[in-house]
Amino acid sequence: MKSLALLFGASLASSQYVPIPWSYVQKEPPVEITVNAHTRFQTMMGGGCSGAFGVACDQTGASGLSPANQDLVTQTLFDENLGGLSILRNRIGSSPTDGILGSCPSTPSSHFNYTWFPNASTADSCQYKLTQTALKYNPDLFIYADAWSASGCFKTDATDINGGLICGVRGSNCTHDWRQGYADYLVQYVKFYEERGIKVSMLGAYNEPDFNPVTYASMESDGYQAKDFLEVLYPTVKKAYPDLKVSCCDATGARQERNILYELGSAGGDKLYDVATWHNYQSNPERPFNTAGQPNLQTEWADGSGPWNDTWDTTGQLAEGLQWAMYMHNAFVNSDTSGYLHWWCSQNGSGDGVLIRLDNDSFDVSRRLWAFAGYFRFARPGSVRIDAKASVENVYVSAFENKNGTIAVPVINEAHFEYDLDINLIGTKAKKVSAYLADNTHNNSLVGHYAVHGSSFKASVPPRSMTTFYLE
C-alpha cells in the first residue's frame, strides 16, 4: 500500500496536522429547480393505509389502547395537519364468520341471508369503528372497500381461500353462474355502511389475483376472467350507486397489473373499471400504466419482513422514511400514480408492516408516516401534479397544485451534503413560501419562510432529507 506521504504529498515525520483552509473546499453550485404549472399531469387521490384482518381491532382498543390514545393514533394518521392521510382501505370479509352471508343459497335465484356484524368482535366491526374515528379527523375520507375473495358459495373451490375462480367466468365450469350473486354481495356491503351513515368511495372485487395463498382469503383471475365478472359488476354498481368507483385489480406488482389491464382491454373491458389498483410487492412502477384514461392507485405495500423500524435514514433499509419518500416520488413521476397506500395503519406488534406501532396503551410513530405527510399534508386530494425538474440527479423534485391555487413542491436530497437551490416558477402567482423538513430529527417541521422575488426564490435542503416547500 502506498504511504500517506506519497498519496498526499506531505511528510509524516513531524506528525503535524495541517488543516485545509475552508476556502479550498469546493462548494457545489446551486441546484436549478424549475416548476411549470402550465404542464399538468394526474389528479391526486391521496395517501392511506388499512386496518384489514383484525388489525383495526388493536387500533380500536382490543390490545389495551385507551380511548384517548385510540383517538390520538387515528388523528396522527388522518388529520390534515399531522399525517395527512385521506384513504382508508377496508377488507370485505368472505368467510361465514367474517363476511355478510350467513349461509350459502342453493341457487342464484334463492334467498341470500345477509347479516351485518355476526358478533361485536368481528374484524369488520373494528374496521367500522376505525372508519368512524378517521372520519372525525378527515370528513372527506376516501373509503376503499375491497374483497380478497368471493365467498366459497360463488367459487370453483367452494372456499374463500386457496385461489379458485368465480363461477361464470371463462374456465370456471360450474353448475351455476354466480357472477350476479357476487356482484350483489359487494353492493350489499356498501349498503350496510350507507345505512350506518358512511359513504364508501370505491369498491373492489379482487386482491392479488395473481397470488393464491392457502392460509387466507384469495381468488384467481387474469384480465380475461376479470372482464367476464366486471361486465356484471360494473353496471350493477352504477345502477345502485352512480358515483361509486369500481377498481381493478390490486395485482401484486406494477408489471402484473399491466398484464391484467392488457388482457382486460384485449377482451373489450377497458371501460369496466374507474381506477387501476396495484401493489408494490413484486415489481416497481417504471412507466405510465396502460389504462384507457383511468387513474392508477398503489393500494398496498410494506416491507413486512423486518423488525419494527421508526427511523428516517440510518442504514438505508426498505422501511426507513427516506426510502419511502423515494418510492412515492418514483410512482408519482414515472407512472403518474394518483396515490400511495401503506399496508397496515397500526398494530400491537413488533414488525415493520405498520405506520404506528402500538404497545398496549403506548405507541411509536414510524418516520415512514412523515414521508407520506411530506406529500399529502400539502398536496391534498384533487390537486394536480405539475411539471418539476432539477438540474442534478441526486435531488428529486415533484410539484402539485391544489384546487385553491397553493402549490406543494417536495424536494428529496439523497446526497450526504447540503444543496443550495434556485427555484424558478412558471405559471404561478406565489408570493410566500414555507418550508417543512423531514429528516432524522424533524417530522415535517416548519423550518423557514421565503419570499418570492419576481418568479423565483432561493433556499437550501439538508443532506438525506425531504423538504416540502408550500407556496401561497
Image (cartoon, grey):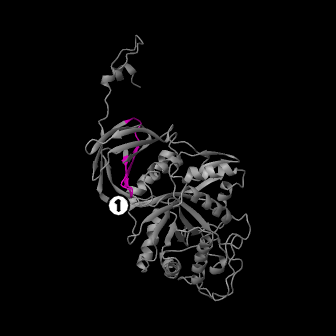
426 lies above or below 259: above
Q: Is residue 107 left or right of residue 466?
A: right
Which span is picked out in magenta? 396-418
For label 1, the residue is 41
Check disc 1 and report its element: helix, strand or loop: strand
Q: For mark 1, does the 10 Å Cα neighbourhood hold few (<14), some (14 to 19), or many (20 or more) residues?
A: some
- Residue 91: image quadrant is bottom right
Q: Name the spot of residue 191 as percent of width and height, x first.
A: 60, 75
Residue occupying the point 41% across, 26% down:
1
Can residue 349 be seen from the camera position used here? no
Q: Please, what is the three-letter code of the amino acid marked with disc 1?
A: Phe
Q: Nearer the viewer, residue 39 or 303?
A: 39
Can residue 464 be seen from the camera position used here? yes
214 inside magenta stretch: no
In the current view of this chain or complex, which residue is farthest to the left?
454
In the current view of this chain or complex, which residue is farthest to the top?
14
260 lies above or below 106: above
Q: Name the spot of residue 417 as percent of width and height, x first.
A: 39, 35
Q: How many marks?
A: 1
128 lies above or below 388: below
Q: Is residue 317 left or right of residue 217?
A: left
Q: Name the spot of residue 433 as percent of width and height, x first.
A: 36, 43
Q: Is residue 280 left or right of residue 101?
A: left
- Residue 437: image quadrant is top left
Q: Name the spot of residue 101 as percent of width and height, x first.
A: 68, 77
Residue occupying the point 38% across, 63% down:
288
339 lies above or below 205: above
Residue occupying the point 30% across, 38% down:
30
Q: Nearer the viewer, residue 278 or 2?
A: 278
